[in-house]
Amino acid sequence: MTSTIDPKSIGKARPRRHVRTLTGYLPELDESGKPKWPRGDEKAWKEAMRDVDTDTPSITRSIVSHVQTSLARQAYNLDDFGAYQAAALSVRDNLILNWNETQLGYTKREPKRAYYLSLEFLMGRTLDNALLNLGLKDQYKDGVKQLGFNMEDVLEQERDAALGNGGLGRLAACYLDSSASQELPVWGYGLRYRYGIFQQLISPEGNQLEAPDPWLEMQNPWEASHLPVLQHARLDIFLPPQLPRLDVTYEVRFYGNADRLPDDSGRALWHGGQEVLAVAYDVMIPGCYTRNTNNLRLWESKPKRGFDLNSFNAGDYERAVESSNSAAAITSVLYPNDHTTFGKELRLKQQYFWTAASLQDILRRFKNMDKPITDFPEYVSIQLNDTHPTLAIPELMRILIDEEELSWNTAWHIVTNTFFYTNHTVLPEALEKWPVPLMEHLLPRHMQIIYDINLFFLQAVERKYPGDRDRLGRMSLIEEGFPKHVRMAYLACIGSRKVNGVAELHSELVRTTILKDFVEFEGISKFGNVTNGITPRRWLDQCNPELSALISKTLKLEKSVWLKDLYKLKDLLPFAEDPHFRKEWAAIKQRNKERLAQHVKTFLGLEVNTKAMFDVQIKRLHEYKRQNLNIFGVIHRYLAIKKMTPEERKKLNPRVVFFAGKAAPAYYIAKLTIRLIVNVARVINADPDTKDYLSLYFLPDYSVSVAEILIPASDISQHISTAGTEASGTSNMKFCLNGGLLVGTVDGANIEIAEEVGENNVFFFGHLAPAVEELRYQHLYHPVPIEEKCPALANVLNQVSGGLFGDGSVYEPLLSTIRQGDYYLLSDDFDSYIAALAMVDEAYLDNTEWVKKSIRTTANMGKFSSDRAINEYAESYWNLEAIKVPTTSNFLTG
Ligand code: NBG
C-alpha cells in the first residue's frame, strides 16, 4: 500500500478543516437581485418538490409507501411495530421539510443564535409530540385507522430516548421544545450514547438490578419483535426523528504534548496523542403550531482511521483494534450517576469530545457569515447546562489563541461574553472537580490555559483584596490537595457572562454559599435566577388529553392558543365554583386513575383500588430527596391502622402510595431504600386487616413515558427534600399542572408554586433552609437519642430492625444513617410530616373543596411553562430574537 502522507506530519496539529455540509446553502442572486435556480430545469424540480402532507389521503399514501419500500413489507405482514415504524418515517419526512426550511431561513437572516450544551437530553417518546406540534394528530389518527391500526397502540411501540438521568436532562428537552415553539434560533448539542439510562429490574428480594438500555436497537419493549435484527440495525439511524449527517465530522484530539511557542505570543502547539472523529446525528425539534423546527445535534465517536495501520504493520494487531475500540467507546454509555461526581477518565473524555466537536461546528457556522471573529459574542451565546460542558471555556480560549492567533485579552473578552452558566445543585458532593494529573495527561494544553486563567484571575482578586490569602485560596480554580483538583463550577463562573440558579431559593443559595466570594468580587448583577419550567405540550396536552380538551372547551380557546400562553389558564378560576365543571374535572381525574390502574395490572399483574386517594413520589432515588421519609411514613400509617378497630378503620380515607425511580448503581443506601419499599409493599398489600385502607406499589423502570401515566392520575404528590437541597424540582410543576396537590418542604420550586397557587392549596411541613446548618451542628455535637427526639420515627425504625419486613439486619446500614448523624434531618421533620399527611387526609374528605383546590392549582400554573423560562433566557441572557419561518415556504416551493 502506498501513502501520499508526509510521515513527519502525522500527529501534528493541522490547520482547521472546515467541512462544508449540505445544509444552509443559499441561492445566488442574479444581476436584478433575484435568486438564481442552482441547477437543472427549475420547472421539473419545482413540480417534483413536495410540501408537508396535511390531509389524510396523502398521509396514508406516505405511510403505505414506507411500509412497501423502507420496511419491505405489505399489508399481510405488518404488525403494530411495523405500523409505528412506517408512521414514524412518514412524520419524519414532514419534519425534514420544515427543518430544511428553518435552517435555510436562519442562514439567510444571519440572526444571533444560542446553543444549549447539555450532556443529557431526556426526550422520551417523540412521535406523539411531533404530531401535536405539527398539528396533524387527528389526520394521522384517521390515516392509521384506515390502514387497520389503532393510534394509541402504534404510539405505544416507541421506545423512550432516555439519554439522561433525571430533572436536568428532562429540563433540557423541555427547553428545546419551547425554543422551537417560541421560534428562537436555538440548537442543542449533546452526545448520542449507544446506551442510555439503564433499564431497572427488581429481583425477587427487592433489589434493583441494572440492564443495559440499547434504545437504538428499537426492539419492541413489550414483546419479541418479528423483524430481523439486521433490519432494526439498518433502520435505527433513521427512526424518528434522527437524521444521520455522515458528512458533518470533526477531529478531536486527546493526550499528546503541548509545547508553548518560544515567543511571547502565548500560543502553544498541541500535538500527538489520540485523534478521534465526531460524527453528527441531527434530531429534529418541531415547534408547536409553527413551521420552525430546530436542531438537536448529537455526536457519535468513531475511530479516525478504521484502525491503526502503523500498529498493524508492526505486528501488533491487538493494539490496532484497541485504538478503534477506545474511540468508539467514548459515546457508548450515559453515566448513570446523579448528583455525584466521580473521576472517571472516560467521563472527562466525553465532556471534552462533545465540547470540542460542538465548538468547531459553532465556529464553522459563524465563519460562514464572514464577520470578524471579535463579533463572535454578537452572534453566538452558549448556555452551559451545569458544569459538564465547562471545558468549552478553555477550549474556546485555545482555539482563539493557538489557531486564530488572538491575544489573551481579546480571547478572554470573547469567551466571557459568549458563555452563560446554569447551576443545578448546591450539594457539595455534586460539584464537579477533576484531578489535575488526569487533566494534564488527557488535555495538556487545556491545563496550561486553566493555570493561566487562574493566575490572571487571582492577580485581579489580589488587587482588590490585597494580602487576603485566605480568599485567594478559597477562590482559586485549583483546590489544594493530593492530588490537586480543578473546580469546574468556579471556572464556569468566571468564564461566563452570567450565572443563574433554577429557582428563587436556589439562586439565593448559590449567591450566598457556593459562589459567595465571586458575588462579592464580580458584583451581584452577574448572578441571576431563571425558575425552571416544563412544556405544557407534553405535560398536559399529551399526557392528559381529556383535561386538555376540557380546558379548551371551557376557555373557548383553541389549544394552540393556551398551550403557548399558559397564563390563559387563569380564566379557569371562576369555574371552580361551577358544580358541573367540577364534576367533569373530577371524572377526568378518576379516568386517569383507572388508566394507571390498568397499567399496573398489565405490567405488574396487580389490582389497584381506584377509589382510594393516589399519592405519588417519582424521582431519582437519593437521600436528600427523602424517599425514606415517605416509606417510614407509610410504615407509621400501617402500624396505626393495625391498631384500629374495624369500625375506626371504616372512617379512614383509603390511600394508595406509588413510588418510582432509579438509584445510581453504586449508591448503596438508595438501593436499600428501594428494597425496603418493595418489601413493605409485599407485607402491607397482603395484610387483610389493612389492605383496603393502605396499599403500596413500586413501579420499576421509571421513565418519561411512565411519568406521563402517573402524573395525571395523582391526587397528591410528594416533594419532601431536606430544605435547601432540591434546587428546583420539575415534577412538582407537572403534577400541579394536572390538578394534583402537593405535599412538600419549603424548598426549590415548591415555594414559588405555593406563591402562585396560594399556600392554602399546598401542604407544607418541615424545617426551613436557614435552620438546617444549626440542626446539623446539634446532631453532631449535642446528639439526642432518636427515642427521645422522635419516638414515632424510632418505633418505625425498630419495627424494620425487628424484621417486620424481612430480615432487619439487611436494612441496618440505611437505618443507621438516621440513627446516627441524620444528615438529612428525618428525625427533625418526621412529626410535622405526619401532621401534614393528616391534613391531606382531612382535606380529601371534603371532596368539593378538594376539587376546587385542584382546579385552582391548575389555573395558577401559568408561570411554570418552559416558554416563559426560555424567553427569560433569550431576553435577559442571550439577547436573542425570534425568527419566524414563513408558513408558506419561499425557498423550496416558492
Ligand atoms: C437537578 C436538581 C433539580 C432540578 C434539575 C433541573 C442536577 C445536578 N440538578 O432540583 O436536583 O429541578 O436539576 O434544574 O441534576
Image (cartoon, rainbow, N blue to C red):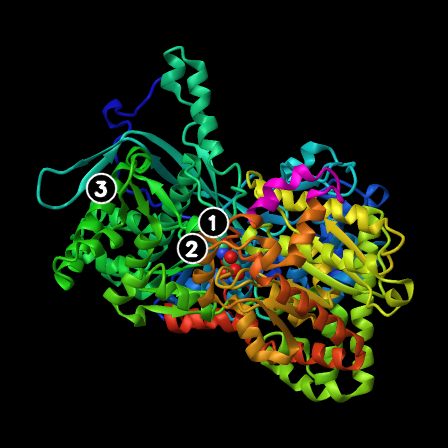
Return the disc, 2 or 3, that comes first in the chain's sequence: 2
From which residue to which does the magenta span run? 801-817
Does residue 548 sit above or below 518 in this rendering?
Answer: below
- Tell me: 268 left or right of 226: left
What amino acid type should be assigned to the residue bearing mark 2? Answer: Asp
Quick check: can you spot residue 55? no
The answer to whether the residue labelled 1 contacts the one labelled 2, judged by CB atoms less than 8 Å apart, is yes
What amino acid type should be assigned to the residue bearing mark 1? Answer: Leu
**Residue bearing the label numbered 3:** 448
Q: Is residue 884 magenta?
A: no
What amino acid type should be assigned to the residue bearing mark 3? Answer: Gln
Would you say the beta carbon of the disc 2 residue lies within 8 angstroms of ligand 1? yes
Quick check: can you spot residue 269? yes
**Residue bearing the label numbered 2:** 386
- Using the image, tell me which numbered label, if any, was put on residue 473: none
The secondary structure that most of the magenta stretch takes on is: helix
**Label 2 vs label 3: CA separation?**
23 Å
Query: Residue at point 47% right, 60% down?
Result: 775
